[in-house]
Amino acid sequence: MADKKPRIVIVGAGFGGVKLAKLFSKDDVEVTLVDRHNFHLFQPLLYQVSTAVLSTDEIAYPIRTFFRKARNVEFFMAKAQGVDQARQVLLTNHGEIPYDYLILAAGATTNFFGMQEVEEHSFGMKTLQEAVHIRNHVLHMFERANKSQDEAERRKMLSFVIVGGGPTGIEEAGAISELVGIQKKEFHNLNFDEVSIKLIEATPNVLPMMPQNLREHTVDVLRKKGVDVMLNTQVVGYDGQVIKLKDGGEIPTRTLIWAAGVKAVPFIAECGGEVDRAGRIIVNEKLQVNGSENVFAIGDCANFCHGTERPLPTVAPVATQEAKVAHDNIMRLIKGDKNLETFHYKDLGAMATIGRGQAVVAKTSMNPEMTGFIAWCAWMFVHLIRLAGTHTNITVAIKWTWNLLSGTRLGRIITNIKL
Amino acid sequence: MADKKPRIVIVGAGFGGVKLAKLFSKDDVEVTLVDRHNFHLFQPLLYQVSTAVLSTDEIAYPIRTFFRKARNVEFFMAKAQGVDQARQVLLTNHGEIPYDYLILAAGATTNFFGMQEVEEHSFGMKTLQEAVHIRNHVLHMFERANKSQDEAERRKMLSFVIVGGGPTGIEEAGAISELVGIQKKEFHNLNFDEVSIKLIEATPNVLPMMPQNLREHTVDVLRKKGVDVMLNTQVVGYDGQVIKLKDGGEIPTRTLIWAAGVKAVPFIAECGGEVDRAGRIIVNEKLQVNGSENVFAIGDCANFCHGTERPLPTVAPVATQEAKVAHDNIMRLIKGDKNLETFHYKDLGAMATIGRGQAVVAKTSMNPEMTGFIAWCAWMFVHLIRLAGTHTNITVAIKWTWNLLSGTRLGRIITNIKL
């Protein structure tokens, strides 16, 4: 009999990390869950915080509350900085954590593809703080434009540009378009013809994971909502005042929201494994980091590319499905069983909302293809039930209903403007 | 007939300013409401944001939403910087605003009584940002103490000191005591005997506006909740690590919350009127700033001292009652009637909550003296109905009920810790 229980260390409390810790909480192991934040973030609804629909604590859930009754799960708030595989320790900004088994579930960050000027002046959409910054900034632009005497300056302040035609970009563009409609009711002296919303996508299509008819439908709906969808358009520079396009065009704007790409968090490069171009660590079919038996990686920070043309997409279902297999494989190793399970991804399809009463849902084994109001209801239902905590389910349901019926958004408060 | 409607400028969108703008919205005047924030803050519940009970947008309401249908009320987000009475303009960081009638309703800020070192290292409790800072800091102290190997350091991180025995200090101390109880359920390896909560009051009594029996009751309740109430104790210094007391005593702590005094916002000194020691501008019985016919002041920034020993207290009912009289007097002046109304304050009594199920309510003409659960229900009811917006009334009622039944606080997220 071993005196000491196996020490499991999980880096990241996103969908994958929390799922893993919940699975291990029922085993005879000691779990340490490490995250730089004390909350689990429901990233799919980040765009709703950035557009003043939801408040921060409706999509952020205290990590410790998940594990209130799980006495073998310890949360440690720290920023992971690297892994010393030889000594079997995780390095953090608050000291080292020894592990017997380590799972990297650290997630992704915005990819600016090396354009530092763009990175410096635009808004990412991966963290709670970024979403709050976008909300504050967009609302502030309206307040400033309202008193400006300079038309060019006003138009620049009322120009909102989103880059990236994936679900995040689509949802953000749709939600900003509706936010403008609400602002219109309260800015009696502002000329709303000066407002413009642009969605810029480098490829010929939005929503790459969707069939062609749904992509076209999405673009149609966005255009009807007043969003100028610019396909085959590439941003090459932004100084905080004017966007430069590859074709030489320019767009004056004070707001550039960058939803055009993700890469693994930089910590992943310090873990001693091989990484791909997007910084993701290569895993084998068993989800082990190349060459290591006791280090696993899952979710957005892992590159799983076995039997698929491209690495699996950076979406929650990949992370949670991988969590299950990583857990089972580690438990097998603990029990001395070297015969590990191979991971197979079950694609659950894709959905995106384009705004009030409008969404697209791709056909899967579980559901038919959907558009319009029915798709929107499906989207709302799926997101509502997946939010952590019954209290949040209830209050978000009330808030969505309230917004729908009252045509307002009470979350429109500017909390960090320096005067 | 005058071509131009009288221009009313109101500085501050607190209880007094919003009330004034609502009254003027029904008159044939042009109103400009100026505030440095775009939201009205429900200050009495600030302590609940600072202790993770409520989220920011539950006590902050978009100012423009009040005036959605009032086309003669214009909101202007700017920081007031002074008044040029000769030219009849309000000076702001975004330009000048001409007025025919000006009402100063700019409110109060924390008074550190000139102790710069204390000001630099402690937390005020007057703004939304300060409340969020307290929440983030207190929660972060638990996370850091949880892994610290140094007992003295741990005790310092788990020592929470509130200075000031008024309602804010009492409510904050009670709410922190309950927050500790919730943390205890989720920090399985922390020794909660190392936690201490101190409430420091310079005078012999808490709650100066209450009768002696309620003051004693309040101290008893706080002590039973584990709060060390230190009366006749004066803070003279704090460097972020150790509080220095006037009697030579020292209290090591990383958290000092300062609720010991208020003063008018500094802008008031730039308005061309005489101010008292707390920076409040002296008003006559008609609420006019000394020597000026068309400049009025109300609420926390005004010193009204007619027929009373001391200036009226800095509470919401004073501001809203003054708003009514200031409005009526300005409308008389507009109509050419020089016979102005004299302000008389109707004291509605005082109430303070000491924590879950415990409050004190002073006897008034409207209600008997109350303590305990019944007082707490009265406190909750009064605050709930006064919150702006039906949606907020509903969600806050749900949240309070949920917290009560579940023993949790989902607002415990740390949003601004630099790593």
Image (cartoon, coloured by chain):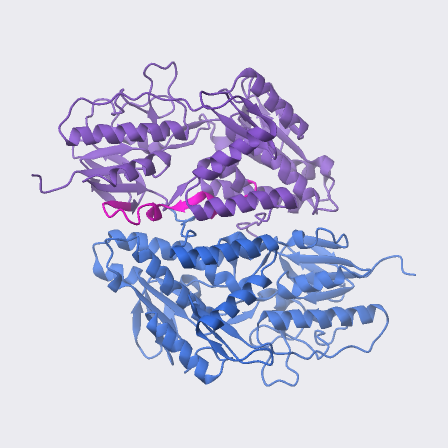
Chain colours: A purple, B blue
Is residue A289 placed above or below B19 in the rendered structure? above
Q: Residue at x 26, y 59 (%)?
A: B154
The residue sitting at the right extreme is B1
Count of residue discs? 0
Q: Residue at x 56, y 40 (%)?
A: A51
Membership of A56 in magenta stretch: yes
Q: Can the viewer see residue B383 in this picture?
A: yes
Membership of B287 in magenta stretch: no
| Foreground pick, B412 / A188 | B412
Is residue A191 placed above or below A310 in the rendered structure? below
Quadrant where the N terminus of chain B sits is bottom right
| Foreground pick, A412 / B418 | A412
Image location of residue B136, percent across then percent down: 40, 53
Quadrant where the C terminus of chain B sits is top left
The image quarter containing residue B222 is bottom left
The residue sitting at the left extreme is A1
Q: Can the viewer see residue B203 in this picture?
A: no
Is residue A113 placed above or below B292 in the rendered structure? above
Image location of residue A64, percent across then percent down: 33, 48
Image location of residue B280, percent across then percent down: 60, 73
Image location of residue A319, percent across then percent down: 36, 30
Q: Is residue B78 left or right of residue A164?
A: right
Q: Residue at x 37, y 19 (%)?
A: A311
The stretch in magenta equals: A51-75
Q: Is residue B402 left or right of residue A50?
A: left
Is residue B292 placed above or below A84 in the rendered structure? below
